[in-house]
Image (cartoon, grey):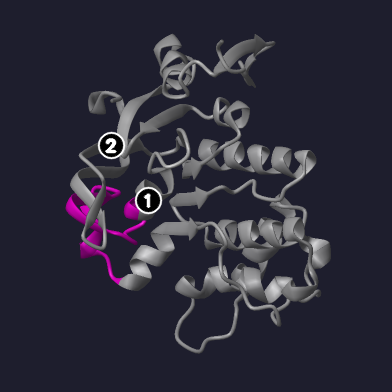
Amino acid sequence: MLPMSSFKQIALHANFSSVCLGKQQVLGPVNLTIPTGQWVALVGPNGAGKSTLLRALAGLEAVTGQLELLGKPLQSYSARQRATQIAWLGQNEAYSEEFTAFDTVMLGRLPHQRWLATASSEDHASVKRAMDYTRSWHLRSRRMGALSGGERQRVLLARVFAVEAKVLLMDEPLLNLDPPHQADWLDTVRILSRQGTTIISVLHELTTALQAQSLVVMQAGKIFHQGFCDDRTTRQALIDVFEQRIGLHQVGMHWVALAAGRKS
């Protein structure tokens, strides 16, 4: 675990004895601290609990324990306050096929608007900026049902960015994106983290995850390791949870994850 004394401000702090789906405990214990302005990638084998942990951090799962957002208990926020401070993108995120891409992204601005108020010039500017991030502005007049999977994903990512929340939680944000648009997402999270936004993303693309500032490595419903990506022990933990079936190789300034194959 990263030392709390090294953080200027805490974006999220979770101390769960358990996280349950129905009556079954699927995670725990969890003690996790995420600083403001950091991009953190959640990684680990299939079934390790990455998506469940992300949902718990968003307040979408039943937990036993404490969850603090920006130094305050999550339950102390009103629904509207929470929606302006933390934004969520899940896998297979719901959308209306009849909505245009522009109207879908504008939904991200609802927490900032008064009841039944029309969108402000600030709302329009936020939507334009978010769609520019994902290079989806040219899709603004098209219905969601007419878009390809990758185009829809870019619009849904723009909806999350349009919230302009302090904390962004994204589960498999690169789903259906081709390499150039994956690079756009990477550029965007770097920009936002420099501006003080905290980004927590579940990623299966380990090479991309290694470009985050830190990793939370999960195994069997528990946090196996948390550390900075430039720390050798973090990279070794990643190799260990995948049972030495991946290798990490430095290429220039970055680390690349490649399959090591099955040992005979």
- Residue at 24 percent across and 47 percent down: it is 71
The residue pinned by badge 2 equals 32
- Quadrant where the N terminus sits is top left
Question: Which of pointers 2 and 1 lies earlier in the amino acid sequence?
Answer: 2
Q: In the orientation shown, which residue stands out farthest toward the front?
A: 264
Could you tell me how many numbered marks the image carries?
2
Camera-nearest residue between 23 and 230: 23
Q: Quadrant of residue 245?
A: top right
Residue 74 magenta-drawn? Answer: yes
- Residue at 26 percent across and 63 percent down: it is 22
Label 2 neighbourhood size at 10 Å, few (<14), some (14-19), many (20+)?
some
Q: Position of residue 49 (x, y in %)?
A: 38, 43
Q: Which mark is residue 52?
A: 1
- Residue at 79 percent across and 40 percent down: it is 180
- Looking at the rendered structure, the kind of residue marked 1 is Thr
Q: Position of residue 35 (x, y in %)?
A: 35, 36
Q: Position of residue 2 (x, y in %)?
A: 30, 24
Q: Which mark is residue 239?
A: none
Tell me if label 2 and label 1 are in contact, CB under 8 Å: no
Q: Quadrant of residue 192?
A: top right
- Quadrant where the C terminus sits is top right
Helix or strand or loop: what does disc 2 sit on? Answer: strand
Label 1 neighbourhood size at 10 Å, few (<14), some (14-19), many (20+)?
many
Above or below residue 49? Residue 224 is above
Above or below residue 248? Residue 91 is below
Camera-nearest residue between 19 and 3: 19
Residues drawn in magenta: 56-78
Residue 164 visible at all: yes
